[in-house]
Amino acid sequence: MNKEILLVNIDRVHTTEMGMDRIKKNLKLDSNDVVEYCKNKILDENCNIYKQGKNWYCEIDNIKMTINSYSYTIITAHTIR
């Protein structure tokens, strides 16, 4: 699937309050702007973006993010071991 679809819709990317807490905990982030952090990672030219089923997956810097392809909600992000 063409990753350009996600990149063109980057302004629609968001998360829920629970998602924000989960991502902050999983990635050990100090920042309160979790969505902006994730968007910056997604926009990095080294980010590996692919779609499987109903989700986009973005992998960069040992981080894997899961984003719903219909609502553009960041479901989770965690470190890859």
Image: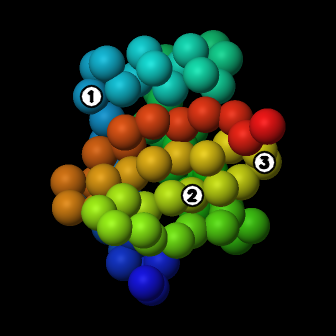
For the C terminus, the quadrant is: top right
Identify residue for label 1.
Answer: 16
Q: Is residue 6 visible?
A: yes
Q: How far separated are the C-alphas under marks 3 and 2?
A: 10 Å
Give the image location of residue 63, x and y in percent: 68, 43
Looking at the image, residue 70 sits to the left or right of residue 75; the answer is: left
Looking at the image, residue 70 sits to the left or right of residue 69; the answer is: left
Classify 47 as above or below 64.
Answer: below
Amino acid type at mark 1: Thr
Looking at the image, residue 72 sits to the left or right of residue 31; the answer is: left
Classify 62 as above or below 57.
Answer: above
User: Crowding at label 1, few (<14), some or many (≥20) Cα neighbours within 10 Å?
Assistant: few
Q: Secondary structure at mark 2?
A: strand
Residue 31 is drawn in which quadrant? top right
Q: Which of disc 1 and disc 3 is earlier in sequence?
A: 1
Looking at the image, residue 63 sits to the left or right of residue 36; the answer is: right
Q: How far separated are the C-alphas under marks 1 and 2?
A: 18 Å
Name the foreground residue: 46 vs 51: 51
Q: How far separated are the C-alphas under marks 3 and 1?
A: 23 Å
Residue 61's mark?
Answer: 3
Name the foreground residue: 31 vs 72: 72
Q: Secondary structure at mark 3?
A: loop
Residue at (45%, 48%) from the top-left corner? 66
Identify residue for label 2.
Answer: 58
Classify 20 as above or below 59.
Answer: above
Residue at (42%, 68%) from the top-left corner? 52
Amino acid type at mark 2: Cys
Residue 3's mark?
Answer: none
Tell me whether circle 3 and circle 1 mark residues in contact (CB < 8 Å).
Answer: no
Q: Which of disc 2 and disc 1 is earlier in sequence?
A: 1
Q: Is residue 11 visible?
A: no
